[in-house]
Image: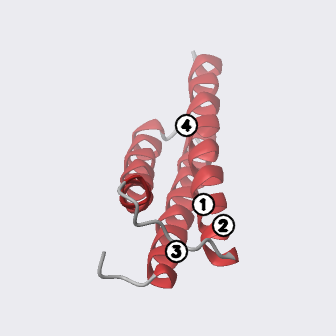
Amino acid sequence: MSLTIEEIAMTIVGNAGEARSLAFEALKEAKEGNYEKAKKYLEQSKERSLAAHEMQTELICNEADGNGIEMNLLMVHAQDHLMTSILARELIEEMITLYKKLDK
């Protein structure tokens, strides 16, 4: 792994934050009945989540290989951002499904 732990953490935070923001943009569009725009925002959100998750997976694989990192507050913060952004997107997907049902 060529990045420092701080760079990895900030990459996770940045991607997770963008994923969360995009998910909430999707919700905003769904509230207005713009389901195609909402779908595109959700797809972009998933891409950002995947980018963050890939960094996390690399850390986990390194840990399994015996090359773990020393946990610090920044990495805990990054993991928290990733988890909450994924949860937000999943809940927003369900909310959009409900909006669609109400529009029928």
- Mark 3: which secondary structure? helix
Amino acid type for the residue under numbered disc 2: Val
Amino acid type for the residue under numbered disc 4: Gly
Q: Position of residue 7 (x, y in %)?
A: 45, 83
- Mark 4: which secondary structure? loop
- CA gap between label 3 and label 2 equals 9 Å
Q: Position of residue 86 (x, y in %)?
A: 56, 47
Q: Is residue 17 left or right of residue 51?
A: right
Residue matched to label 1: 79
Residue contact between numbered discs 2 and 1, judged by CB atoms under 8 Å: yes
- CA gap between label 1 and label 3 equals 8 Å
Residue contact between numbered discs 3 and 2, judged by CB atoms under 8 Å: no
Q: Which comes sooner in the sequence, label 2 or label 4? A: 4
Q: Residues within 10 Å of mark 4 (few under 14, many from 20)?
A: some
Q: Nearer the viewer, mark 4 or mark 3?
A: 3
Amino acid type for the residue under numbered disc 3: Ala
Q: Quadrant of residue 1?
A: bottom left
- CA gap between label 2 and label 1 equals 5 Å
Residue matched to label 3: 9
Decide: is 58 above or below 42: below
Tag on residue 76?
Answer: 2
Image color mode? secondary structure
Q: Nearer the viewer, mark 4 or mark 1?
A: 1
- CA gap between label 2 and label 4 equals 37 Å
Q: Position of residue 49 (x, y in %)?
A: 45, 54
Q: Is residue 13 left or right of residue 35?
A: right
Residue matched to label 4: 33
